[in-house]
Image (spheres, coloured by chain):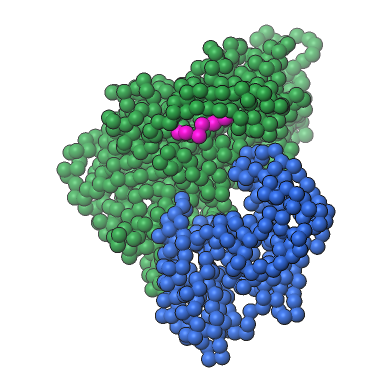
Chain colours: A green, B blue
Amino acid sequence: MDRKYIGKRVVRNEDPRLLTGQAQFVDDVQFPGMLHAAFLRSEYAHARVLKVDVSKAREYPGVVAVFTAEDMGRDWFPGPPLVSPPPTVKDVIFHSRRQVPLVKDKVRHAGEAVAVVIAESRYIAEDAAEQIEVEYEPLEVVLDLEKALAADSPRVHDDLESNLAAQLFQKKGDYEAARKEAEVVIKRRIVIERGAAAAMENRGIVAQWDAKGRHLTVWDTTQAPIPIRNGLAARLGLSESQVRVIAPFIGGGFGPKIMMFYPEEMLIPWVAMKLNRPVKWIEDRRENFYATTQERGQVHDVEIALDRDGRILGIKDDFIHDTGAYDPYGLTIPINTQCHVMGGYDIKNFSSEFRVAFTNRIIATPVRGAGRPQGIFVIERMLDLAARELGMDAAEIRRRNLIQPHAFPYQHEIVDQAFAPLVLDSGNYPAVLDKALEMIGYEKFVKEEQPRLRKEGKYVGIAVAPFIETTGIGPYEGARVTVETSGRVNVATGIGTQGQGHFTSFAQVVAEQIGIKVSDVRVTTGDTSEFHWGTGTFASRGAVVAGNAVHAASSIVRGKILKLASKVLGAPEAELELEDGQVRIADIPQKSVSLGELAALANPLRGAVEPGTEPGLESTAYFGPQYGATAFGTHAMIVETDPETMMVKIRRYVVAEDCGTVLNPLILEGQIHGGVSMGLGNSYYEKLHYDENGQLLNASFADYLLVSSTEMPRIEVGHLETPSPLNELGTKGVGEAGAIPVPALFAQAVQNALHDRDFEILEMPLSPNGLFELLNKETE
Amino acid sequence: MKPAPFEYYAPATMDEALALLAEHGYEAKALAGGQSLIPMMNFRLVQPSVLVDLNNIGGLAHITPGADGSLRIGALTRHNQVETSAVAEQYAPLIHFAMQKIAYPAVRTRGTFGGSLAHADPSAELPALCTALNGRFRLVSGRGERWVSADEFFISLFTTALEPDELLAEAEIPAMPPRSGWSLMETARRPHDFALMGVAAVVALDEQGRCADARIVFLSAGEKPMSAQKAAEALRGQSPSAEAIRAAAESAAANEIDPADDIHGTAKFRRHLANVLCRRALEQAFQRAAGKK
């Protein structure tokens, strides 16, 4: 289709405001008389709370109130279940244990909030929090995933028989039978550790209660303002129309900002109502490490069976997933992992059981990738080991196993995070693999350059990793599109925006239908007073689900415009064209009417209208997909390692990506760049170090090593487009894609660079020290 | 992450600053660039009740060459002033080179030469480099002033010879003798991080091309800049062969440092790095001394 606005490198509508400091973030919200909150957080990871004495803090000058769990009375109850019920798979076990506003009986992770101090300034609130005396009885901590599930482990939740939070078995075909046919069977244990999402902006909440108007307004860095509004109304005994939640400009979400409800999210609005004063809480970076959700911790026992040609006959992957102290987010992460172990490969036999363990770590909820990088790491590592065993090229073994273009829709025969069957809707996987190989010059590098570099004593390696990303799941999103009498178009949708460029990509979708400049489309996201149906921004679904809702509403508005213009201009609709904010008769361009004039005519101030007429050029529409659209990509890279210092330098980084219809390549590439940087963090830099007491040892950016500009390679991105048949725009999500294959790719590249060393990378993240230990294992 | 309450003074003269330090003693902290002190205060790791801001005092930021080839650097000279100074490059090329390894540009714009020395973080570059270059520091107080050599100044972790009423006013880096060479080798997780291990080597050759003098000082290798005096002594009088260099590096890494385990690296890995980096540093320093690089 010939498109005028969609697919173009349109610069972002929102950037002038963001770059000149004119965009409103939660911390920009100021009110006279506003109070500030600071939390007293547990220094223990697991302890009974015997006594909380806040008397000194209450007397501290400038303190307005101090609250503990006891002080909340009947308003103290856990957060709502976020993702439930668990899937309708046979024999699933799921024990729901949800986070609480303030700790009452016992602390389950270091950093859990015990009390909140409300004061005239944040400084005073922090000073007073130091005056609170808490008597703890420390308990043995639960950290190791296998030990957590042992019968004699101390329990995170005393009322459960064990730390087993959930258990789920899924299979396809018959793995045991396939194994018997196999020429090669490889079994390994793979360990993946936690990282942080580390958004540039931490969390924050401002709540303002209007006692006379009986109305609560909350500014929240949430990815899901509508569920927060509905949940707050229910918690606080208000009607939904009495609560407005605004998710303004947000400096990155990456998943944790959709954890609902955080303790602070439950508390701050409650306190604002209680004290009848505006209250602000801005999470600081240390709190972000201790109180914002994290992800990735898993231990896999995986076995792969192949024939002598390198074709996968089956995979068996049993793993334990660390959910931390509570499991409000259900089974999303481990199910994603399970689904991505099969990846984009044609695997006939699969068997996987996961167990979810409660531990004394911070709650795990999805972080960009959400279980997918672990699954891809597992399958790609096993393919690398198989290729080595079979003496086969890394790219070749992958090519032989990829799902072929004629096989779509392809059934993986297990259920995914949306509890729908995992069906891969469309794609041309081998073409994407070939594109990545061509971009990086794979064959020439392997045949010519690498042998030459090795002769020079340089340890330079290449890697290629294909991956799928399940995206764009339901249930639905909606949008309202309105042509205003100014001729500009207003769009509102319920999802939140944390940097994804929705203000531009949705405007492009509207412009395509209505024929106006992208900069003349004003998009509002994340304000429940503007639009109050929908779920939120997660699972790489904004462009797919909300994007198609915007498209649907725009199409209806286009119809209304044509119908009215046809009357005004006295020409059949088929002869009209929409361009530059005007409707013209195609052959007589001087006969035209502007969108603004039409909008005024559609909303007359006097006179009669035809019965049944709706006013204005406006429509609200919804989109919910049958199931999620699955994107595909392949990353390739060349690294140089120094086998003496263990330092790794990326020489080239290539991404070939097929996420269906591209709305805006600039935005898409930005998503990929950001994703790759997180993926590199998960590969070599970003690891949360918990000590044996469950204390986080690197809760600051001095010791938690984010990938910075000095580590980022230049990324070359190539696009292929296989439109998804599941939605009219043909879009598939891409928000998490960049992060997914990177650890698998990184491990492969380092192994390939150090080709003459006998070692196996079976852990992530790696580090120079970790690599040193792997390379020196045999001498120990 | 807000600091505990403190009193703030911003004296305009050195005398006033010294009087405040004398009055408040251990309760007071001097504020220069604030690149270490302020984060530590925000974490409440340090809670000084008095902060004496030195930034309004004139004359503390200067880069002054001496007639004898030495260089004096004022305590409040910002890292980026040294980094962009042709005088520093000419008179103290090792110091000048090291500037690009200190954190990242934002920190170097604010952080000061004297602040880094007085803070005495054993992972920082400047304490190790001043030790390797036989630098000395002028310490002033209401009681007068004294010069202390870098070797004597750094006592242990964040601990120096400074008395609570004293300020470090300037550093002096002596000229290197003819046929000298230097090197700084570091391995850091990211270029702007504290090094996992680092080593500065400063050598001089005699007229026969033998090692006349060597100084080897490690950073991130113990409680203070770790000077490998025995390894350096063993090189003296020797031809700087690959073998001699390898032996010196191995001996220094094995016997003259005391690295600790932390989350970024075990002591074992750090010793391994010390060996590798020391060898590379000595090779480069001797090559420079021989005019090869």
Q: How many marks?
A: 0
Residue placed at 29% from the left, 39% from the top?
A317
Residue placed at 39% from the left, 24% from the top?
A157
The answer to whether one can see residue A552 in this image is: no
A169 or A418, nearer to the observer: A169
Judge whether residue A211 is colored magenta.
no
A740 or A642, nearer to the observer: A642
Residue placed at 71% from the left, 20% from the top?
A277
Judge whether residue A44 is colored magenta.
yes
Picture coordinates of residue A14, whole percent (x, y): 68, 38
Q: Which quadrant: the C terminus of chain B?
A: bottom right
Please report the bounds of the magenta region as a residue range.
A40-45
Q: Which quadrant: the N terminus of chain B?
A: top right
Residue placed at 45% from the left, 75% from the top?
B248
Picture coordinates of residue A373, whole percent (x, y): 42, 42
Task: Name the quadrant containing residue A168.
Answer: top left
A175 w.r.t. A489: above or below: below
A24 w.r.t. A92: above or below: below
B62 w.r.t. A299: above or below: below
B64 or A700, nearer to the observer: B64
